[in-house]
C-alpha cells in the first residue's frame, strides 16, 4: 500500500507543531535565536523523538518552537507552509488548531487579533482546489477563569474564521466542569466543540472523558485513549456518536502507550466507537501524517480499506463547512447516525 496516495482527513494537528526546519533556522537567525544548523543536533535539541520521561525537557522544546512565532510575517509564512505540508501529505480536509495565548507568550508586540489575522492570511495564501482548511481556537485548561473567558470571547467574536473551539493542557483533578459555561457560550454561537481529554495515565481519566461528553457537550475527544478502561464510557461515546482523534506516535512519545503495537485504536474500533488518525505535532515529533499510516499498517495490520473507512468517518465528523468538504473529498461523505 502506498500511504501517500490515499486522500486523508487530519482533524487533530497543532499549527504551532508544523514547521520546516530550514524556516526555523532562517527565522531564528533573524531573531538572534541559536538554532542548530545540522540535522542531528536539531533533532536532539529541538524535537521530541523518544518517549518523554522528563516533562521539563519536553516543555523546553515546546518553548524553543514557540519562540520563533514572533511576528505577523513569520506567523503568516509558517501557516502557509503548514498548509503546503498538508497538501504534500495528501490531506484534503485539514483542521489546524492553535492557542492564541501560547503564541502571544513572550511576544508583547502580538495581540490575539494580529496573530489571528496573520494565520487567516496564511491560510488564504495557501488556498487550493484540493484542500479545505478549518481553524480551531484553543482555550488552555491551565488558565484562570477570567483568562479562559477572555480567550473564549475572542474565538466567539471571530467565529466566521474559526470552525471550532478546543481545550488543551492537562486535566487537573475534576476541574473540567468549570469550563462548561464557556463552552456552552461557544457552542451557542455556532462553534463546534472538541477537547483534549483522557490522555493522562491517571485513575480518573475515563471520568474526564465522561464529563467532557455529558457536562460540556464534546462532539469529539482529542486523544482520550484511557476511556478504554471503562466500558460504560466507551458505550456513552458510541451512543452519542463521539469521535476520538487518535495520534499513535504522539501517545507513544508521551509514554501513554509502551509502543505503537500497544495502542488501543483497534479496541475503540471493535467497540463501535468512531476514531480518526492524526499526527498531533508532526514536525515537533519528527514525523508526518503518512508516518502514522505506515506504522499502523506495519504494527497493527491496518488495510487500505480500513484507512478509507476511517477517513470517510473523519470527513463526516470534520467541523469544516459541508460545502467545502464536499468540494474536496473524492467520495460520498457518510451521514452520521
Image (cartoon, grey):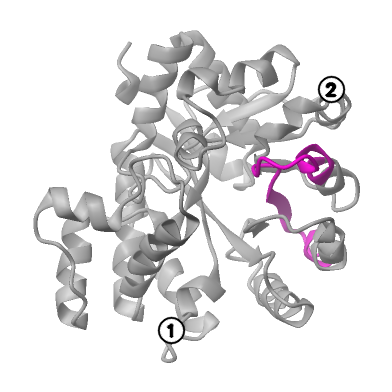
Figure quadrant of residue 61: bottom left
Provide residue 54's location: percent of width, then percent of height: 46, 53
Quarter of the picture holding the C terminus:
top right
Which residue is at 62% across, 58% downward?
A: 169
Provide residue 135's location: percent of width, then percent of height: 54, 57
Identify the magenta region. Answer: 184-209
The answer, for residue 188, to whether it is visible in the render is no
Asked which secondary structure carries label 2, the reply is helix
Crowding at dot 2, Cα within 10 Å, few <14 / some 14-19 / many 20+, comes out as few
Crowding at dot 1, Cα within 10 Å, few <14 / some 14-19 / many 20+, comes out as some
Q: Is residue 208 magenta?
A: yes
Residue 226 bears which disc, if any?
none
- In this view, 41 is above or below 131: below
Which residue position is annotated with label 1? Answer: 106
Figure quadrant of residue 17: bottom left
Which residue is at 46% across, 46% downward?
A: 53
- In this view, 22 is above or below 74: above
Figure quadrant of residue 175: bottom right
Q: Are marks 2 and 1 in contact (CB under 8 Å)?
A: no
* Label 2, label 1: how far apart the Cα atoms are: 44 Å
- In this view, 58 is above or below 108: above
Closest to the observer: 303 or 171? 171
Provide residue 235's location: percent of width, then percent of height: 86, 24
Q: Does residue 229 appear to the left or right of 245 in the view shown?
A: right
Which residue position is annotated with label 2? Answer: 231
Q: Does residue 106 appear to the left or right of 35 in the view shown?
A: right
The answer, for residue 317, to whether it is visible in the render is yes
Amino acid at each position: 500500500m502506498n500511504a501517500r496516495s490515499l486522500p486523508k482527513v487530519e482533524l487533530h494537528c497543532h499549527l504551532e507543531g508544523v514547521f520546516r526546519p530550514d524556516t526555523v533556522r532562517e527565522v531564528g537567525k533573524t531573531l538572534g535565536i541559536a538554532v542548530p544548523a545540522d540535522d542531528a543536533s536539531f533533532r536532539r535539541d529541538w524535537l521530541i523523538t523518544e518517549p518523554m520521561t522528563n516533562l521539563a525537557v519536553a516543555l523546553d522544546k515546546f518553548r524553543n518552537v514557540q519562540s520563533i512565532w514572533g511576528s505577523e510575517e513569520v506567523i503568516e509564512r509558517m501557516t502557509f507552509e503548514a498548509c503546503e505540508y498538508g497538501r504534500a501529505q495528501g490531506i484534503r480536509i485539514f483542521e489546524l488548531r492553535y492557542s492564541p495565548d501560547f503564541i502571544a507568550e513572550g511576544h508583547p508586540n502580538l495581540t490575539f487579533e494580529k496573530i489571528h489575522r496573520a494565520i487567516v492570511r496564511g491560510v488564504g495564501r495557501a488556498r487550493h482546489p484540493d484542500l479545505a482548511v478549518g481553524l480551531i481556537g484553543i482555550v488552555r485548561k491551565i488558565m484562570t477563569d477570567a483568562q479562559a473567558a477572555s480567550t473564549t470571547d475572542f474565538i466567539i467574536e471571530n467565529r466566521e474564521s474559526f470552525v471550532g473551539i478546543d481545550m488543551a493542557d492537562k486535566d487537573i483533578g475534576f476541574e473540567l466542569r468549570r469550563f462548561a459555561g464557556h463552552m456552552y457560550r461557544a457552542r451557542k454561537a455556532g462553534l463546534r466543540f472538541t477537547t483534549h481529554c483522557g490522555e493522562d495515565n491517571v485513575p480518573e481519566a475515563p471520568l474526564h472523558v465522561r464529563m467532557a461528553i455529558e457536562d460540556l457537550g464534546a462532539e469529539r475527544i482529542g486523544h482520550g485513549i484511557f476511556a478504554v478502561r471503562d466500558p460504560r464510557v466507551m458505550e456513552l461515546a458510541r451512543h452519542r456518536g463521539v469521535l476520538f482523534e487518535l495520534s499513535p506516535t504522539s501517545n507513544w512519545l508521551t509514554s501513554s502507550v509502551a509502543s505503537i503495537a500497544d495502542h488501543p485504536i483497534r479496541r475503540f474500533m471493535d467497540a463501535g466507537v468512531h476514531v480518526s488518525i492524526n499526527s498531533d505535532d508532526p514536525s515537533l515529533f519528527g514525523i508526518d501524517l503518512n508516518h502514522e499510516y505506515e506504522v499502523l499498517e506495519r504494527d497493527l495490520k491496518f488495510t487500505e480499506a480500513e484507512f478509507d473507512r476511517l477517513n470517510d468517518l473523519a470527513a463526516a465528523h470534520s467541523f469544516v463547512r459541508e460545502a467545502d468538504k464536499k468540494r474536496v473529498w473524492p467520495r460520498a461523505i457518510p451521514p452520521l447516525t
